[in-house]
Image (tube, helix red, strand yellow):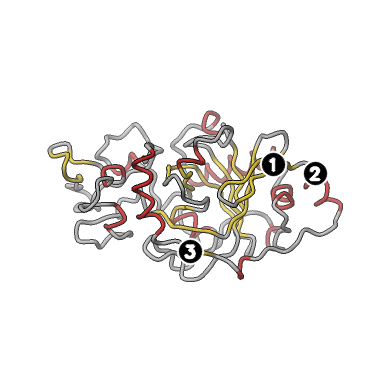
Amino acid sequence: MRTSPSVAIAGFVRRIKHSVPLLALASCIAVSAAGDLRAAARKATVWKKYRGTSIHTLQGNRAYCYATGFMTIDADGAPEAYHPKNTGLDDLSNAGYPRTSWWDTVLVPDPADNSRPYILKSGPHAGYYVSMTALKDLRWADTDSRRYVDASRVPYIVFPETFAALEGVGQIGDYGVAVNLASGCSSGFVVADIGPRRHPLGEISIALACRLGGKDVSARTGPSRPMGRILYIVFPGSAGRYPWPREVHSIEAITRKMLDEAGGVAAAAAAVGCVLPEAVAGGLGPCRSGTGH
């Protein structure tokens, strides 16, 4: 969606507004001296840092992982994301219309008048603007909300533009797994959008935040309370193996398979210097309050 540097810089203002800095409550337990964790850690390699976040490769660079307590919530792609009367899931100012020049990277322009965003004419979401994501289902028209990845239903993450340009990090349509290191809640996800150039890692969809245990998740304000550090494991190149679109149950199945191939969640946790919550011992999965099924 926001692919040019100038557009991404302009979009930074709208993104940073609902940042949820997760600090003291998100502190991570040090890795124990247990042999299995030491072995897992040896298989991980520090790749580089991106805006203060350490990135680690796993199992011969088949995956990489990072952990961060920074979080912003994305509503883009949801049919109810933005409304002319500002009654949508997100504040209309965060779509840039009408006072900024970058709104057409967030909202679909009206084919009959490109100076205005398109408003859905019929269906359950009639009256809403159509908001975009970089990942698209090309079976549908530009003005059809089904073309875009619904942030309220699909767990996804956003790559900052500068991060997306780095070699080896993958691309739009790749998959991964996120684990809440405080609660043990987890979810598969897809990389569905491109964000501002200088934004930290940690922008995720409403659905992903809910599946990781977020309460009263809002694109306007974030979760009602800090969620703790989140471990993200990304599988570069997986878009080619598993083309979009996918239902959420399919995202879960393929990401768990790839996680096993990359050495498992314990290896990723060890790489970032954390041990997993006891809840993970019972198996990965979203919190019961999560959405997106």
Q: Is residue 239 left or right of residue 277?
A: left
The Cα atoms of the two marked residues, 2 and 3, are separated by 33 Å
Instruction: Look at label 1 and name its amino acid.
Output: Asp
Instruction: Look at label 3 and name its amino acid.
Output: Val
Q: Secondary structure at mark 1?
A: helix
Instruction: Look at label 2 and name its amino acid.
Output: Arg
Q: Which residue is mark 1?
A: 260
Q: Which of the 4 image quarters holds residue 182?
A: bottom right
Q: Which residue is mark 3?
A: 20
- Which residue is located at x 33 percent, y 43 percent? 132
Q: Residue furthest left?
A: 112
Dot 1: within a 10 Å radius of its alpha carbon, few (fewer than 14), some, or many (20 or more) residues?
Answer: few
Q: Which residue is mark 2?
A: 42
The Cα atoms of the two marked residues, 2 and 1, are separated by 17 Å
State the residue in front, 88 or 96.
Answer: 96
Q: Secondary structure at mark 3?
A: strand
Residue 227 in picture, x, y percent from top left: 55, 65
- Which residue is located at x 72 percent, y 33 percent? 60
Dot 2: within a 10 Å radius of its alpha carbon, few (fewer than 14), some, or many (20 or more) residues?
Answer: few
The Cα atoms of the two marked residues, 1 and 3, are separated by 31 Å
- Mark 1 or mark 3, which has the lower sequence index? 3
Is the Cβ of the residue at disc 2 closer than 8 Å to that at disc 1? no
Q: Is residue 198 left or right of residue 65?
A: left
